[in-house]
Image (spheres, helix red, strand yellow):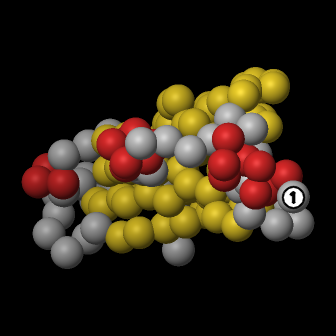
Amino acid sequence: MFGLLYFVGGSKSDGNAAKLNQIKIFNFAIKDSLEQNSVKYDHLIFEDQIVTKYDLAFNYGKTSYSKINTPISAYSGTTGLVIGTHRKPIKISVLKTSDKDTFKYLVYGILEWKLLGVRLYTQSKIYDGVKLLI
């Protein structure tokens, strides 16, 4: 019932809907500065709830001069049931560590709770950790 009310109350024009569903990609390095064929993709789930998952996906590659893994770009997404909530990543950082096969990550965002299109509650969320590369 609440899901139906959310869809009716929270309807947007087609132009706004397309704008809301765009993924924001955070860029860290230029692909051309990296070794050819060294670019890889990795992914991690940093919050796994019953029906919703929040994740981070990023590309990385080796620099041509030092052969060290370097982050290229990243984005954060949501999968699963998201009725009544809207998550907006504000800042994503993926950093090299002293271990060449490990990155530190930080995802800062806002989570809005809505009912009938009206924002009820807003909270900031910070996820950080270390990811061993595959």
Residue 103 x/y as whole percent: 54, 50
Looking at the image, residue 133 sits to the left or right of residue 9; the answer is: left
Query: Label 1: which residue?
Result: 1
Q: Residue 120, relative to residue 20: is it above or below?
A: above
Q: Residue 112, relative to residue 41: is it above or below?
A: above
Residue 16 x/y as whole percent: 40, 39
Give the quadrant of the N terminus: bottom right
Quick one: SS at disc 1?
loop
Looking at the image, residue 3 sits to the left or right of residue 134; the answer is: right
Identify which residue, 123 or 47, lies in the foreground.
123
Residue 110 x/y as whole percent: 66, 30
What residue lies at 64% left-to-right and 64% top-to-bottom?
79
Residue 58 x/y as whole percent: 44, 57
Looking at the image, residue 76 sits to the left or right of residue 123; the answer is: left
Identify which residue, 54 or 84, lies in the foreground.
84
Q: Residue 99, relative to residue 37: is it above or below?
A: above
What residue lies at 54% left-to-right and 50% top-to-bottom?
76
What residue lies at 14% left-to-right and 69% top-to-bottom?
36
> Hey, what amino acid is under mark 1?
Met
Q: Tell me how many marks there are.
A: 1
